[in-house]
Image (cartoon, rainbow, N blue to C red):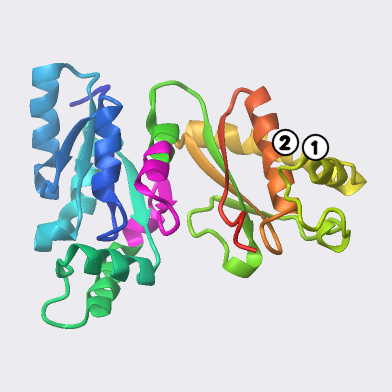
Amino acid sequence: MSGATSDLIIVTGMSGAGRSTAAKALEDLGWFVIDNLPPQMLPTVVRLIEAEQGESVQIAVVVDVRSGAFFADLRGALASLADQGLRPRILFLEASDDVLVRRQEAVRRPHPLQAGSRLLDGIARERDIVRDLRGDADVLIDTSTLNVHQLATKIEVAFADADAPVVRATVMSFGFKYGIPVDADMVVDMRFLPNPHWIPELRPLTGLDDNVLTYVLAQPAARQFLDRLEGLLDVVYAGFLQERKQFITLAVGCTGGKHRSVAIAEEVGARMSQRGVEALVVHRDLGRE
């Protein structure tokens, strides 16, 4: 496969975090999807698909702990592919323990690593096994608060037209009191800005309302921050493209994820779009207060 031009995604992560949904979304985007492939077969299968469909085919392979002892050989398989001219990208799907437990119980299936013990024990074993792989992920998505349609949208943002030399971004507002998003590549804190919560007429509104948006963006510190963030993101975009990492999640936080973070996330998303970055703005905690 020396000089191969195929695009390969390894879909992996925690059991119950949405691998099947991600695979279906990639299939809908035109990717050739293979589920539960033993890692040792990766180089052979890629060669076979290229021989059948040409070297520019887009291939997505779901690899996870269902492969048992074979899963431990995934790193070796990835290294072998790299030696042959193909650098796969890793999509890692994550979710919190309580969400994974709820999803596993809903489908009434034992965890593949449960082995007669508690479900949480199986989840803990899996986290330990995939920890290094999670650290190597090119795209990390926390599906704890996502439904299947929202996850499919994030997959589309990350991988549609993946050969195009552009950065795709998710700008996510959140509230620190609900926890920092685990899938964030960068986190910025808006709690240095005056809080609209303390202005009676703005308190019931959100950062999507014009009055709040105008108030937040009128702060001199907000304008200065946004201008400097743009310069920083230009450096990040260039570095990500060089490393073939085309998807970034920027998390914008304030206390409750209702006013400041929402307004700033909307403005950052608009500025990204003006600079040619495909930006999806989501508000994780809006409505929780």
Horizontally, residue 232 falls left or right of residue 237, namely right
Residue 227's tag is: 1
Residue 144 within the segment the image draws in magenta: yes
Where's residue 83, x and y in %? 24, 37
Q: In the rendered structure, are the residues bearing label 2 and label 1 in contact, judged by CB atoms less than 8 Å apart?
A: yes
- Depth check: 115 or 208 in front? 208
Q: Quadrant of the C terminus?
A: bottom right
Determine the residue located farthest toward the top in the rendered image: 54
Q: Gap in Å between the C-alphas at discs 2 and 1?
A: 5 Å
Residue 281 within the segment the image draws in magenta: no
Determine the residue located farthest toward the bottom in the rendered image: 117
Q: Which residues are magenta?
A: 132-153
Q: Label 2: how many residues lie within 10 Å, few (<14), some (14-19) or many (20+)?
A: some
Residue flagged by tag 2: what amino acid is it?
A: Glu
Q: Is residue 244 visible?
A: no
Where's residue 56, x and y in %? 25, 19
Element type where label 2 sits in the image: helix
Where's residue 29, x and y in %? 30, 27
In the image, what residue occupies the spot 58% across and 67% down? Answer: 178
Q: Label 1: how many residues lie within 10 Å, few (<14), some (14-19) or many (20+)?
A: few
- Depth check: 39 or 179 in front? 179
Label 2 belongs to which residue? 230
Residue flagged by tag 1: what amino acid is it?
A: Asp
